[in-house]
Image (cartoon, coloured by chain):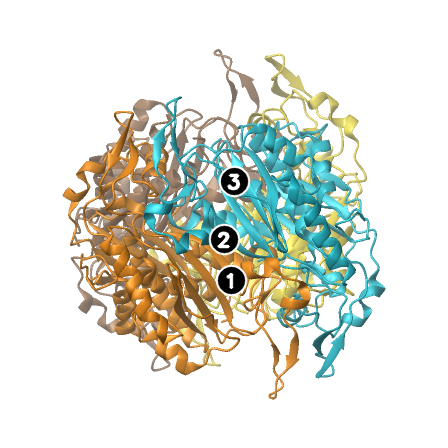
Chain colours: A brown, B yellow, C orange, D cyan
């Protein structure tokens, strides 16, 4: 099964890049929840291709229609279905790709899995476009979390070789608001222009570039999550790896801890001045033994360079059985990191919502 | 829910470090499967504390008893329950720890989650001991995979600052066998002694050290896995992050790709001499769009340094509300990487088995 | 969670009686399945209100639009979403019912569950209208079953006091075809007119009448289903009790066996002339110990009289806190049994499909 | 999957009639729950064969051992595993039955499903013995329900042709206590001796007899359950049909309503003297549209006559391919209804607990 996820809030995502529509069914939004539809639209807009500097020249409004489950902006408690029409599809761009497998794309695996019955145009169901319903669902989850004082915020940790600094042990509200207001949010303002330059350079070369997104969930009390199979890390990573182009996930200092001694990275507990139990450092990213510690949940994801590049590449034509050259055309993001950021936040919101108490 | 996982093969893990027993119920082993019980024991022995160089001085045989589901070594098709008695428990070692939270351990989160009703001795259900039932289940899954020509093999990619080389695009059978025969398996034989020295140094200092384990699943055909929520990466990472001390997971080149251009890391397809579709490189670790490509599934995990160290640490006594000093006693692994390796393989086998066709 | 069901084929149903649309997402239809859309439409038409003798005067075409997952009539393997617009809604009929609870309807429970946020018009999500997406899903499942030689057929076992005869131990193809061709299918042709008269009499009285539907699944091999929790009976009954107005389910002779001796009702095995293992009788309805026996799966459901009647009834106004009288207006089926029949078949097809082997 | 059930409280049942042990893992008992172990034992004793008038001459204490999850009688919050050793097995009784299929038993379906690898002795996993772990789990669920003022009570509605009266619209506490104190609980005391005589007569004839159990869940507030797939009826029936020998389930007046007019059986709402919303009748058994109405949940199950009888029966030997005669020996209940009653209550408690709020 590919399209159904969750327990407390269950989501069913459907659609392909060039189908009539894509969408999502949300089952479990509490009756009486006042939905801020403008806030949902704002999240959708962050992800939508806007033709701007960091994005594909393709523009899609990602306007959603609510088929059911909401009356006068209030959740009825029954499943909510949101549908987004696919309007701006140029299927002709993909005619050459029926049998030619794009490198580092899902084409070949899909073809084998679906025995060539899948809609290959625009990547079909493997398209990044399917993250739009995920952002819709995540925007709803964010609102449910906000009711409980839980916030999700993120920044671009790196683009190519240009790195921002990491979140500290505390993420204060003004930083959170500042990051939310930026298209390319960074903690160290000095790196923004260099990141833009890195993306522009990749675009100029007909190439692409990868990066990392660091995300924090603040306000989550200690004691949530489960040992073993439903650890906070398990549930989060499961959704994060559902986002196309994510190839790595680490919590807190993650890989950085592997070359260290325990005495260097253990997070030591202390009572702060208000009598709260906290840790001096947060190398474990707010999770120990699968359970939240009360510190911010901090993780980052590795986003590979956009697979679609305009340079000529070697590949195969599976119909003719020949090794061939491929030069992609069309409209592609030179760096998917910027548009992936709201998707990562959406995934985080959905994952964390599974753990909160009613 | 913490203890139930899976679909095609469903496992229920139970027990705590100092309970009467720990164990696992496996639901879904096909009727008629001839189980190689010696091979299961061998996997269990790889994980069990053996008092050797890399391990805690504590020795536990991890002998399992089969309560049901197996007759004359053959799976009946009904649930299999394996129970492992907890024999060598020294609860007195933990008397001081009822209210004192060990740094980087699950103690505090557990206490909050279970409102102090959990058995804190030996870490209770957060103990690494709970990986024994996981290894049992994984050992069964390995045998089911082997019937289909699928193998799981791994090596220690690093201990502290000492690094082994990565798996190549192909993992041949002789390498796989060599790795399986070693307690501290590495590809580059030259690093083994340096890794041992790194562990010995940490032990001598009353400290611990982290590392990485790289694992490969070979023989998996293209087209397995699901887009979106049940991607190969999602299912694998979900189980991997259930293993204590795992703080990061990356597939293929993972984080290494984030600083690269698409043209540098895209995996280009080609027909090999036998007409098989393959990629020249395997930066994506055998998964694209959540689906297997037919290349080896390659991932590695970040293992943090063992949280238990003998150096004095700052922490809190939650009963008295005071900041206190803690000096741990008892028996602990200076580097959990070596014993975590068979657990990672077990998790990989269980995760991959979800995807194979009957 | 209310709207998601299944494993091998997972369905998510959404919508309310008066929402913009209702629909269903089907996840798990095998790639390459040629869907007979006309056959699906025919099943939908059996359920849709047609204004005929046994039905509400309301007419709704129940035309579905496929948003994704199907290309040129062939399933792509990705989720299929079918949407049915709600066109013929007369919300004014329901204005009086906001606070007045209709007897034997879900109004009060819904109001309590959803804290009065649910759309009460037309019964909201409790409306029989939500069985339209179920019939769509069931029609797809039927086609998947037909590929394996499995058929689902049913007849009206009773309307009020008028009873048809039961299925025998074998249901031959000609009977199955005859039943499928009738709006009011019965085995004993003599009872059809009497059933019609029973319905007409109830309608004339502004009243309603109940009945029973007997359903058989033929062609299912022995050995399917699971002991304990996923018994054939468990999975079937779970879906059957999801159909509004179903208040009882029995397998084979069901309640009839409770007054009998074992020697009277035990199904004795024998080898038939072709060497097949069969039973002389089928009192167990083709299931023993939760597993199929190879005999037809036979069950029947109790359908209560339509709750909506035109006679004045006692009830409460929960806003005013008063006991009140209620006289329903609008358009209602005097006997829902006829239109429930294709829904029961759909539920049966969906349930049984969970058990078949690939 | 056969052995795992539930969501809020997840249970994994394992074992076979003649395996070393049977048992259950319960995942989800809230930390800090004080378990009344004596009350659990009392429930187990109701189900255990006691060699008395209504039972098999076989005696089994059904003593359970708690392997984990409970400390000093208090649930830790982690999974609880209870194991019951199989002590009193006379496997020789079953030697003749390897290839001879007992009429109305699961033997043949199991053999086909498990390709003859299952342990056929004592019915293996299809044995009624597997209801012991279910009763253990149900006894825990009962205690969790009792904390919320919810009670589960039942009586024998019929044995053969001898019928007790039905529950009324209210079940007062003194009736509940009286029923709980009886081995053969009935509302109308006059029928008890006649029921005993019915059972004794069947036993004397080497035959068996069926019956019905009516069960009520009191104290459940209105508004629990879900529309569609997780209706109260769906979840209850799914578990009830997991209990061996159950062949029918009806809620409230169930089948009795099918021959009636709506005006005769609609449950009319009224405000009682305390201002509570109630219904004059409870023909719907406390559930409308899948949701609880606040009236008692009332259902009854049809229990077929014990399949094991001592009269000679026709059947097949699947090894020789011959039609044969079978005369069963051993120890069997002439009427399983009496011992099934606590199992039905356990199933009800487990099912209802899924719906209650924390």
Label 1 sits on a secondary structure element that is: loop
Q: Which residue is mark 3?
A: D352
Quarter of the image where one finds residue B128 = top right
Query: Image point 79% across, 39% down: which residue?
Result: B58
Residue B311 appears at what percent x and percent y? 68, 25
Residue D41 appears at what percent x and percent y? 73, 37
* Structural crowding at the residue carrying mark 1, measured as other residues with C-alpha within 10 Å and reported as few (<14), some (14–19) or many (≥20): many
- Kindly identify which numbered label has been placed on residue D311: none
Query: Image point 22% across, 62% down: which residue?
Result: C65
Sequence-wise, the earlier of marks 2 and 1 is: 2
Locate the C terminus of chain B and report the quarter of the image it occupies.
Answer: bottom right
Label 3 sits on a secondary structure element that is: helix
Label 2 sits on a secondary structure element that is: helix
Query: Image point 67% across, 42% down: which residue?
Result: D136
Whether residues under marks 2 and 1 lie with C-beta atoms below 8 angstroms apart, the answer is yes
Asked if both marks, 3 and 2, belong to the same chain, the answer given is no
Residue C164 appears at what percent x and percent y? 41, 69
Q: Give the CA separation, mark 2 to mark 1.
A: 9 Å
| Chain ID at mark 3 | D
Locate the N terminus of chain B and report the quarter of the image it occupies.
Answer: top right
Q: Give the CA separation, mark 1 to mark 3.
A: 34 Å
| Chain ID at mark 2 | B
Q: Give the CA separation, mark 3 to mark 2.
A: 31 Å
Q: Which residue is mark 2?
A: B235
Q: Which residue is mark 1?
A: B355
Q: Nearer the viewer, mark 1 or mark 3?
A: 3
Q: Nearer the viewer, mark 3 or mark 2?
A: 3
Residue A266 visible in this rendered orientation of the protein: no
Asked if both marks, 1 and 3, belong to the same chain, the answer given is no
Residue B276 visible in this rendered orientation of the protein: yes
């Amino acid at each position: 099964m590919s399209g159904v996820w969750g327990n407390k809030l269950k989501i069913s995502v459907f659609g392909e890049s060039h189908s009539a529509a894509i969408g999502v069914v949300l089952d479990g939004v509490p009756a009486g929840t006042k939905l801020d539809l403008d806030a949902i639209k704002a999240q959708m807009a962050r992800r939508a291709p806007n033709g701007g500097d960091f994005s594909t020249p393709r523009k899609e409004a990602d306007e959603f229609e609510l088929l059911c489950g909401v009356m006068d902006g209030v959740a009825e408690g029954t499943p909510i279905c949101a549908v987004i029409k696919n309007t701006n599809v140029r299927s002709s761009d993909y005619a050459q790709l029926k049998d030619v497998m794009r490198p580092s794309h899902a084409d070949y695996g899909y073809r084998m899995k679906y025995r060539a019955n899948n809609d290959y145009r625009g990547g079909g169901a493997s398209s990044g476009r399917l993250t739009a319903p995920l952002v819709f669902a995540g925007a709803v989850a964010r609102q449910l979390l906000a009711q409980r004082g839980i916030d999700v915020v993120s920044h671009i940790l790196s683009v190519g070789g240009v790195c921002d600094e990491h979140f500290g042990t505390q993420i204060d509200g003004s930083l959170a608001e500042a990051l939310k207001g930026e298209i390319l949010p960074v903690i160290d303002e000095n790196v923004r222009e260099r990141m833009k330059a890195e993306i522009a350079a990749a675009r100029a070369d007909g190439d692409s570039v990868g990066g990392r997104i660091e995300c924090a969930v603040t306000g989550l009390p200690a004691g949530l999550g489960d040992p073993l199979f439903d650890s906070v890390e398990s549930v989060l990573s499961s959704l994060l790896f559902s986002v196309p182009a994510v190839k790595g996930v680490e919590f807190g200092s993650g890989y950085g801890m592997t070359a260290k001694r325990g005495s260097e990275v253990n997070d030591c507990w202390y009572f702060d001045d208000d009598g709260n139990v906290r840790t001096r450092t947060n190398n474990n990213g707010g999770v120990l033994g699968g359970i939240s510690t009360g510190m911010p949940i901090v993780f980052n994801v590795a986003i590979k360079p956009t697979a679609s590049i305009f340079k000529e590449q070697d590949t195969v034509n599976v119909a003719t059985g020949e090794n061939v050259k491929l030069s992609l055309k069309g409209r592609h993001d030179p760096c998917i990191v910027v548009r992936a950021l709201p998707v990562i936040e959406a995934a985080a919101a959905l994952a964390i919502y599974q753990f909160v108490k009613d």
